[in-house]
Image (tube, helix red, strand yellow):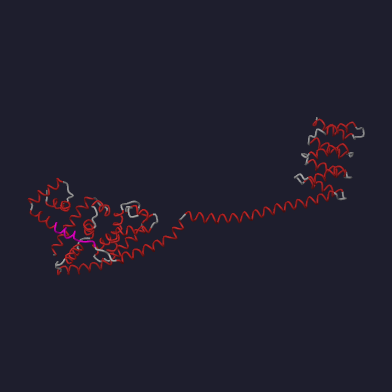
Amino acid sequence: MKCTEIQNQFTDYLEGSVSEVANSDVKEHLNSCANCYQELEELKSFLTILDNEKLDIPSANLRMNFEKMLAKEIEKEQPKVVQLQPEQNWKTYLRVAASVLIVISAFLIGKYESNVTKIANNYQVEKQQVLALLENSSASKRILAVTNAEEFTKKDTKIIDALINRLFFDNNANVRSAAAEALSKFSTEMIVRDALIKSLETEKNASVQIELIEILAKIQEKRAVESMEKILKNEETPQYVKQQIELNLPSLL
Amino acid sequence: MKHLTDEEVMLQIANGKLDMLTILFDRYNVRIYNFFNKMVHNKMVSEDLTQDVFMKVIKYKASYKNKNFAAWIYTIARNIFSSHYQKTKKERSNEIDDNTMSNEVLVSESRQEELDHLQKALLQLKNSERELIVMHRFQEIKYEQIAQIIGSSENAVKVKTHRALKKLKEIYFQTA
């Protein structure tokens, strides 16, 4: 083995970190090579000097400055951490969202409620107007009132009563006819059906009779068959009324 | 807290627990300071550079990612030394001239003089040689880890360290 190769292993050799084979190689070489032996001795004494070197202790300034720096960095980081914390954001957003929701819903509820009362108020006003109109002395006004009464899709006993009243007692045939038509819209009500049948029995006016026959056939009121047959038998009944009955009666049988 | 490894502590710092850096400062400040002091032989500068290392640890905490902490912090220390060296190249060349002048009159009578002499010999080595001796002899960092720090193989580090040591010994005894 060459001297340089042996010398390259000196530090490991002195630390005892070379393999046994290499160790004996080095020992053998040292016995025969004075040059390398001297080199090793020099290195040994030099390493003693190196190893005597103690760690220098830094001044207190180092720690002081470090602590100052760290405190500054933590302070710098603090607002960022808060900003990045999702929980915090979440709650804040939730709070804002909740208050916005409350304001909006309060507004909407208020609006809705005012609408409801407005509609209800309108309904009441209109109903009063219709009911008043139904009693008006002018027949055309009463017809207008009856057609207006049709607009009340929601069943309202006051309106229905008023219409039935018109159907039975109005002097004007056109008003009675219009009332019958208006009442046909509320044919689901038993009181309306009864009124229509009864009206057919008592009605003398041909055009109103025809209107009633048509309505009763349309709403499939089987109880009206008896009244219709009675009208058919009546000799006074005009021919075109009988024809109307004969036309509609089969649908009820 | 004290039983955590350097790596565990560093991961917590990376996750934002900056105050944990105090633990790593306690473990490393003297070693890092001595590394710089051997490299530049100036206490004030070494303290400043040590401070820079811990600032960089915070600055680059996100890039740490589970490496060997000692290797990582020495990599930072080497980079800081390197940029310091580049910055003060001119001043330092004058300084070395002064040092070589004074070496001729230096006689190792007392222990302090002996240490000064060794330090001056160290400063005559190349940076790359000096840091190997500093890391291996003074900081007792294993060859394997030095290889990791300087980006070399363990065997290459062994050979280079031995050569640097031999060179240092020659400088030391020549001027003794």
- In the depicted view, which residue is nearer to us: B138 or A204? B138
Q: Is residue A53 magenta?
A: yes
Residue in front for this viewpoint, B142 or B132 = B142
Whole-percent x and y of residue A98? 57, 54
Image point 18% across, 55% down: which residue? Answer: B162
Residue B51: x %, y % from top left: 32, 63
User: Does residue A108 appear to the left or right of A80 in the view shown?
Assistant: right
Q: Position of residue B13 (x, y in %)?
A: 37, 56
Highlighted magenta segment, given as a residue range: A44-55
> How many numbered marks does the figure carry?
0
- B109 vs B58: above or below: below
A78 vs A15, left or right, is right
Asked if the stretch drawn in magenta spans residue A73, the answer is no
Q: Residue at x 31, y 59 (%)?
A: B26
Looking at the image, which residue is at 86% across and 31% down? A229
The quarter in which the N terminus of chain B is drawn is bottom left
